[in-house]
Image (cartoon, helix red, strand yellow):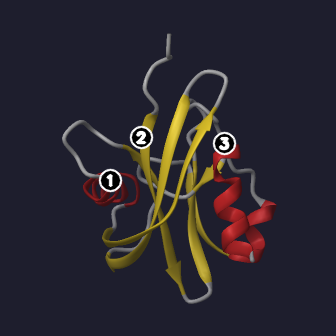
Amino acid sequence: MSGPAAIEVAAAILRRGGSILIAQRHKHDPLANFWEFPGGKREPNETFEQCLARELQEELGIAVRVGQLVHDVTHAYPERTVRLCFFECELLAGEPKPLDCQDCRWVTAAELHRYKFPPADDELIELLTK
Protein backbone atom coordinates (compact mmCIF):
# COMPACT_ATOMS: atom_id res chain seq x y z
CA MET A 1 0.00 0.00 0.00
CA SER A 2 1.56 3.30 -1.05
CA GLY A 3 1.26 6.55 0.86
CA PRO A 4 -0.25 9.78 -0.37
CA ALA A 5 1.06 11.27 -3.60
CA ALA A 6 4.00 13.61 -3.35
CA ILE A 7 3.26 17.31 -2.91
CA GLU A 8 4.48 18.98 -6.10
CA VAL A 9 6.35 22.25 -5.66
CA ALA A 10 7.89 24.67 -8.17
CA ALA A 11 10.76 26.87 -7.00
CA ALA A 12 12.74 29.69 -8.60
CA ILE A 13 16.43 30.23 -9.10
CA LEU A 14 16.26 33.97 -9.60
CA ARG A 15 19.59 35.73 -10.14
CA ARG A 16 20.63 39.38 -10.03
CA GLY A 17 24.27 40.17 -10.67
CA GLY A 18 26.13 37.60 -8.60
CA SER A 19 23.24 36.96 -6.20
CA ILE A 20 20.32 34.53 -5.89
CA LEU A 21 16.97 35.35 -4.26
CA ILE A 22 15.97 33.32 -1.18
CA ALA A 23 12.89 33.61 1.04
CA GLN A 24 12.23 32.70 4.67
CA ARG A 25 9.24 30.52 5.56
CA HIS A 26 6.60 31.77 8.02
CA LYS A 27 6.83 30.80 11.70
CA HIS A 28 3.59 28.78 11.41
CA ASP A 29 4.52 26.84 8.23
CA PRO A 30 6.01 23.34 8.13
CA LEU A 31 9.80 23.81 8.27
CA ALA A 32 9.17 27.13 10.03
CA ASN A 33 11.89 29.80 9.74
CA PHE A 34 13.85 27.77 7.18
CA TRP A 35 15.09 29.58 4.08
CA GLU A 36 14.09 28.35 0.63
CA PHE A 37 14.13 29.16 -3.03
CA PRO A 38 10.83 31.02 -3.53
CA GLY A 39 7.89 29.19 -5.02
CA GLY A 40 5.07 26.98 -3.84
CA LYS A 41 2.63 24.12 -4.29
CA ARG A 42 1.24 23.29 -7.70
CA GLU A 43 -2.54 23.44 -8.00
CA PRO A 44 -4.51 20.83 -9.99
CA ASN A 45 -4.58 21.63 -13.75
CA GLU A 46 -1.64 24.02 -13.39
CA THR A 47 1.78 23.51 -14.99
CA PHE A 48 4.89 23.90 -12.84
CA GLU A 49 5.69 27.06 -14.81
CA GLN A 50 2.21 28.58 -14.22
CA CYS A 51 2.46 27.66 -10.55
CA LEU A 52 5.83 29.37 -10.18
CA ALA A 53 4.71 32.59 -11.90
CA ARG A 54 1.59 32.73 -9.66
CA GLU A 55 3.45 31.95 -6.43
CA LEU A 56 6.16 34.57 -7.04
CA GLN A 57 3.46 37.18 -7.71
CA GLU A 58 1.59 36.21 -4.51
CA GLU A 59 4.60 35.77 -2.21
CA LEU A 60 6.96 38.49 -3.46
CA GLY A 61 4.95 40.78 -5.75
CA ILE A 62 7.15 40.14 -8.79
CA ALA A 63 6.56 39.07 -12.38
CA VAL A 64 9.01 36.55 -13.84
CA ARG A 65 9.72 34.64 -17.01
CA VAL A 66 10.09 30.98 -16.08
CA GLY A 67 12.97 29.38 -17.95
CA GLN A 68 14.44 25.90 -18.06
CA LEU A 69 14.12 23.21 -15.43
CA VAL A 70 17.47 23.02 -13.60
CA HIS A 71 16.85 20.35 -10.96
CA ASP A 72 14.04 17.92 -10.12
CA VAL A 73 14.18 16.09 -6.77
CA THR A 74 11.77 14.02 -4.70
CA HIS A 75 12.43 14.07 -0.95
CA ALA A 76 10.66 12.02 1.73
CA TYR A 77 10.20 13.86 5.02
CA PRO A 78 8.71 11.92 7.96
CA GLU A 79 5.31 13.57 7.50
CA ARG A 80 5.15 14.01 3.70
CA THR A 81 6.93 13.48 0.42
CA VAL A 82 7.73 16.51 -1.70
CA ARG A 83 8.70 16.72 -5.37
CA LEU A 84 10.61 19.94 -6.02
CA CYS A 85 11.19 21.32 -9.50
CA PHE A 86 13.67 24.21 -9.62
CA PHE A 87 13.54 26.56 -12.62
CA GLU A 88 15.87 29.33 -13.77
CA CYS A 89 13.77 32.50 -13.77
CA GLU A 90 14.21 36.04 -15.06
CA LEU A 91 12.81 39.02 -13.16
CA LEU A 92 10.53 41.00 -15.49
CA ALA A 93 8.81 43.47 -13.15
CA GLY A 94 8.67 44.47 -9.50
CA GLU A 95 11.11 44.44 -6.61
CA PRO A 96 10.82 41.37 -4.33
CA LYS A 97 9.00 42.14 -1.06
CA PRO A 98 8.05 39.59 1.64
CA LEU A 99 4.26 39.65 1.07
CA ASP A 100 3.61 36.01 1.98
CA CYS A 101 6.88 34.99 3.63
CA GLN A 102 8.86 36.30 6.63
CA ASP A 103 11.76 37.77 4.72
CA CYS A 104 13.56 37.67 1.39
CA ARG A 105 17.09 38.60 0.44
CA TRP A 106 19.67 38.41 -2.31
CA VAL A 107 22.69 36.29 -1.37
CA THR A 108 25.70 34.93 -3.25
CA ALA A 109 25.96 31.20 -3.94
CA ALA A 110 28.87 31.06 -1.48
CA GLU A 111 26.60 32.53 1.25
CA LEU A 112 23.87 29.90 0.85
CA HIS A 113 25.58 27.62 3.40
CA ARG A 114 25.06 30.30 6.09
CA TYR A 115 21.27 29.83 5.89
CA LYS A 116 19.18 26.92 7.16
CA PHE A 117 17.44 25.26 4.17
CA PRO A 118 15.16 22.19 4.11
CA PRO A 119 17.07 18.95 3.37
CA ALA A 120 15.31 18.67 -0.03
CA ASP A 121 17.30 21.72 -1.19
CA ASP A 122 20.73 20.23 -0.39
CA GLU A 123 21.44 18.83 -3.87
CA LEU A 124 20.53 22.10 -5.58
CA ILE A 125 22.71 24.11 -3.19
CA GLU A 126 25.59 21.75 -4.02
CA LEU A 127 25.02 22.40 -7.75
CA LEU A 128 24.85 26.17 -7.26
CA THR A 129 28.00 26.37 -5.10
CA LYS A 130 30.25 24.28 -7.38
- Residue at point 65%, 30% (across, down): 77
Say if 19 sits above or below 6 in the image: below
Local crowd at mark 1 within 10 Å, few (<14), some, or many (≥20)? many
Q: Amino acid at mark 3?
A: Asn
Circle 3 — which element?
Answer: loop
Q: Which residue is mark 2?
A: 8
Does label 2 or label 1 sit earlier along the sequence? 2
The amino acid pointed to by label 2 is Glu
Residue extending farthest left: 45
Say few, some or many: other residues with alpha carbon within 10 Å of mark 2 (under 14 / 14 to 19 / 20 or more).
some
Q: CA distance from mark 3 to mark 2?
A: 21 Å
User: Where on the picture, by quarter, is residue 118?
Assistant: top right
Q: Nearer the viewer, residue 89 or 108?
A: 89
Residue 69 higher or lower than 74, as above or below: below
Q: Quadrant of the C terminus?
A: bottom right
Tell which of 84 and 93 is nearer to you.
Answer: 84
Q: Position of residue 122 (x, y in %)?
A: 71, 54
Which of pointers 1 and 3 lies earlier in the amino acid sequence?
3
- The residue lying at 25 percent from left, 51 percent from top is 47
Q: Amino acid at mark 1?
A: Phe
Q: Pointer 3: what residue? A: 33
Residue 39: x, y in percent? 43, 53
Task: Report if the CB atoms under discs 2 and 1 are less than 8 Å apart.
Answer: yes
Residue of label 1: 48
In this view, the mark in front (3 or 2): 2
Q: Residues within 10 Å of mark 3 (few under 14, many from 20)?
A: some
Q: Secondary structure at mark 1?
A: helix
Q: Is residue 17 above or below residue 129?
A: below
Q: Earlier in the sequence, mark 3 or mark 2?
A: 2
Residue 124 pos. (x, y %): 64, 62
Determine the CA span between mark 1 and mark 3: 24 Å
Which residue occupies 27% across, 39% down? Answer: 43
